């Protein structure tokens, strides 16, 4: 098993160019099935989750190549509607294949998805939305067999703005007869990016990022070349790392509006931040300040995917910070690892009470999930002494050559 070896207590300084958003690339790769032609998806990071999605598409018969950061998918050769169970257990994002495979093949067989163990994350809302479009779903022993003679456009009122359910419903509705309206959809920038990709293929989708998304069913899509948006969570992670180490960083290829909630909290912590069209500059204060209570919520609120990293940051701040996790019930697994490093954190229900300490100490810790692993790296960079982070396979799911990017900023970090 690979691990990170970090010698901390060194400021990060320099410039970092953001890669494409993991949470945009994965549903767009799934959506390439719809076209029956060739899509060139640019600005794709080299992540283990992306590689797994590519492997699934290949096993379903698509021709896929990866060249200079672009993934080229020819889905004209798709010849299977079964999503391999071994891959379903590897990444939760494999569930995105339900909608497009049903739209293309009229059926799909799969198991329940895997991924990080950060909570139940049921797919009930996905199944609810697909049933409204006319899909028959049979469940037995953890396996799902879904089929539909013809998808029929309809109104879908989501009980919760689930990102995955919104995206699955959008993709299935592309090939439905008539018009579909999704009410209470997720509003994340990645939803807008999926809409823009679909429209670049000739689809008619409107309203992503608002309270309603309208999809006009269309039978023929075309080839396209599409560049995905930069990764706002990667951006937030690097900003937090620079702030935790008392350094400064300039993010390039950024969309600052996508990170506004995180940027505002960093300002509240005492960081100097300058924002331009596609750039964010941060300079850390001499001592970070605790911020007002943080509660994770769907976009545009504070992202659950930044909760762990911000907690690591607040362990070094002056004062108390309350962090409430409202999205996933098991997303505090990094807390006991941070405590090994000298953090002062108490858990009460779904709220963490973080009291800043003078300095964290290096320790031997274990990543339990993707973003929790990133928080341990941030803590290790800020700590005195040496930190060993085990299980970095989790971190590889969401950060492209994380250790190399951090090393360019002056971090003493090696993959062992």
Image (cartoon, grey):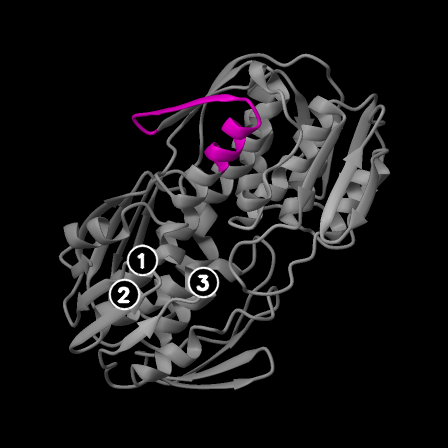
66 falls in the magenta region = yes
Above or below residue 105? Residue 155 is below
In-front residue for pair 271/243? 243
Q: Give the distance between the C-alpha atoms of the residues marked 2 and 3, in whole angstroms.
A: 22 Å
User: Vertically, is 66 above or below 11?
Assistant: above
Left or right: where 81 falls relative to 284: right
Look at the image and say whether residue 7 sits in the magenta stretch.
no
Q: Secondary structure at mark 1?
A: helix
Whether residue 285 is visible: no
The residue wearing badge 2 is 243
Give the structural element (helix, strand or loop) at label 3: loop
2 or 3: tag closer to the N-terminus: 2
Q: Quadrant of residue 66?
A: top left
Mark 2 residue element: helix
Q: Is residue 199 left or right of residue 243?
A: right
x then y, percent, for residue 79: 62, 20
Residue occupying image coordinates x 61% and y 64%: 327
Q: Which residues are magenta?
A: 53-69
Mark 1–mark 3 contact, CB under 8 Å? no
Q: Where residue 251 sits: x, y (%)?
A: 28, 47
Question: Around disc 1, counting alpha carbons within 10 Å, would you say few (fewer than 14), some (14 to 19), or many (20 or more)?
Answer: many
CA–CA distance between discs 1 and 3? 20 Å
Q: Which residue is mark 1?
A: 239
Residue at the disc numbered 3: 369
Q: Nearer the viewer, mark 1 or mark 3?
A: 3
Residue beneath the point at 39% across and 34% down: 44
């Amino acid at each position: 098993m690979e691990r990170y070896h970090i010698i901390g207590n060194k400021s990060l300084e320099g410039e970092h160019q953001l890669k494409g958003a993991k949470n945009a690339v994965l549903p767009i790769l799934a959506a390439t099935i719809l076209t029956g032609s060739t899509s060139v998806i640019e600005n794709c990071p080299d992540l283990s989750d992306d590689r797994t999605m590519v492997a699934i598409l290949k096993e379903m018969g698509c021709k896929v190549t990866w060249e200079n950061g672009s993934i080229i998918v020819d889905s004209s050769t798709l010849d299977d509607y079964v999503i391999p169970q071994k891959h379903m257990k590897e990444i939760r994002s494999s569930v995105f294949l339900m909608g497009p495979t049903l739209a293309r093949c009229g059926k799909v067989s799969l198991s329940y998805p895997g991924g990080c163990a950060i909570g139940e994350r049921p797919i009930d809302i996905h199944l609810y939305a697909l049933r409204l479009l006319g899909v028959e779903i049979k469940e037995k022993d953890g396996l799902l067999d879904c089929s539909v003679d013809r998808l029929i456009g309809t109104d879908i009122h989501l009980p919760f703005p689930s990102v995955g359910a919104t995206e699955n419903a959008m993709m299935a509705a592309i090939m439905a007869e008539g018009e579909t309206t999704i009410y209470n959809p997720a509003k994340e920038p990645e939803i807008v990016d999926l809409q823009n990709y679909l429209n670049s293929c000739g689809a008619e989708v409107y309203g992503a990022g608002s309270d309603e998304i309208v999809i006009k069913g269309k039978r023929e899509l075309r080839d396209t070349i599409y560049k995905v948006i930069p990764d706002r969570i990667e951006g937030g992670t690097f900003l937090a790392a620079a702030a935790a180490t008392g350094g400064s960083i300039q993010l390039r290829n950024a969309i600052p509006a996508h990170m506004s909630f995180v940027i505002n909290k960093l300002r509240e912590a005492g960081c100097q931040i300058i924002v331009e069209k596609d750039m964010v500059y941060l300079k850390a204060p001499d001592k970070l300040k605790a911020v007002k209570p943080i509660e994770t919520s769907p976009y545009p609120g504070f992202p659950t995917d930044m909760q762990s990293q911000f907690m690591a940051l607040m362990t070094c701040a002056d004062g108390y910070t309350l962090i409430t996790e409202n999205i996933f019930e098991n997303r505090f697994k990094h807390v006991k690892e941070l405590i090994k490093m000298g953090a002062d954190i108490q858990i009460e229900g779904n709220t963490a009470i973080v009291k800043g300490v003078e300095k964290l100490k290096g320790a031997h810790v274990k990543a339990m999930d993707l973003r929790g692993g990133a928080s341990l790296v941030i803590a290790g960079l800020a700590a005195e002494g040496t930190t060993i982070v085990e299980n970095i396979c989790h971190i590889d799911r969401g950060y492209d050559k994380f250790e190399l990017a951090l090393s360019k900023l002056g971090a003493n970090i090696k993959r062992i």
